[in-house]
Image (cartoon, rainbow, N blue to C red):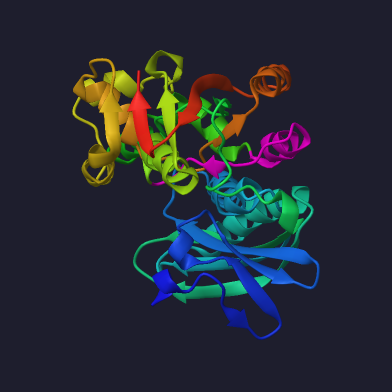
Amino acid sequence: MLSNATRLAAGTGEVLVGAADGDDAGVMLFRDRALVATLDFIPPVCDDPVRFGRVAAANSLSDVWAMGARPLLALNLCAFPSAAPDDVLAAILEGAATVVGAAGAALLGGHTVRDPELKFGLAVVGEADPERLLTHRGARPGQKVVLTKPLGTGVLINAFKADKLDESGLESALVEMERTNAEAAALALELGATAATDVTGFGLAGHAWNIARGSDVRLRLRFDALEAHDGFYDLLARGVSTGCTRGNFLSIEPHLDRSRALDEAQIELLVDPQTSGGLLVPLLPENADVYVERLVASGHRAALVGEVVEGPARLEIY
């Protein structure tokens, strides 16, 4: 039913991006603004509850920024074990509140349930100019593609949980997971971006395919331009993987062209599920260069990683 509903009457607004679109967030037109809504929650990625709260908040807010919107309000969502001390929950909420406040949004409360496994995240509402939304449908042939963060957090987090990596080995990835996509999204809009996505659970290949499919273009990614977090390949060699990589690969394989040989570890990087991953942004070539230069100058690990060419919709790794 949703696949047939491109324009839904919704009381006071009109749905611009709905569930059938498979985009990063839902969007409703309200008066002359686009309201952007999303939610996400994750299990812990580290032992420090404050840092976990920051990562979870950055991860939840990311979909709003990926749509070209600014966050307005957020609600905490938490599943918390009965045996865990309350000061752990307080620390998680403290970390999240810091990130939400820095984003300029209001944290209005939330809901907690008892659960054997700790999980935390946010429901977020943002707003945007409806004429400047960044969706999967906006990529155009001739654009260059920028990725704003390295890849590989899925394997590193699993290695940490399996005691095959200590927190010092996770540190550089934690810094990137704590880094929000606010600056990268604002600069993308300033430089005329017409599409974007954040790289999260489907891995780089899955999210790149979403743009290719939505825009009916061939999106070409240059593998040698992709940066992996320190330790990623060593951990793979030691048998660390994630439960999502096989499913991610099987879903993308029918749409994937390989112009170069890829070994198993390289494929793992392409489909590794990210937590609080970077933005994938197509831009005009001259603006893509400026985008990378300005992000790198402010501490981001951004890189030109590909290009957009005429369709039909395919994802190519070269």
Quarter of the image that includes the C terminus: top left
- Does the magenta-highlighted stretch encompass residue 184? yes
Residue at screen point 48% across, 59% down: 41
In the displayed structure image, the side of residue 212 where residue 248 appears, left or right: left
Residue at screen point 60% across, 82% down: 9
Residue at screen point 45% across, 43% down: 216
Q: Is residue 47 visible?
A: no
Q: Quadrant of residue 138?
A: top right
Looking at this view, is 241 or 84 the one in front? 241
Q: Quadrant of residue 196?
A: top right
Q: Point out residue 56 in the picture as x, y percentages from the top left corner.
A: 54, 51
Q: Point out residue 137 in the picture as x, y percentages from the top left corner.
A: 54, 48
Q: Quadrant of residue 266?
A: top left
Count of numbered badges drawn on the protein: 0
In the displayed structure image, the side of residue 216 where residue 143 appears, left or right: right
Looking at this view, is 147 or 10 the one in front? 10
Q: Residues in magenta?
A: 180-201
Q: Please determine whether, in this image, residue 111 is positioned above or below residue 290.
A: below
- Does the magenta-highlighted stretch encompass residue 157? no
Quarter of the image that includes the N terminus: bottom left
Q: Please determine whether, in this image, residue 284 is positioned above or below residue 188.
A: above
Q: Please determine whether, in this image, residue 82 is positioned above or below residue 68.
A: below
Q: Is residue 225 visible?
A: yes
Q: Point out residue 295 in the picture as x, y percentages from the top left corner.
A: 69, 23
Looking at this view, is 57 or 269 the one in front? 269
Q: Point out residue 78 in the picture as x, y percentages from the top left corner.
A: 51, 66
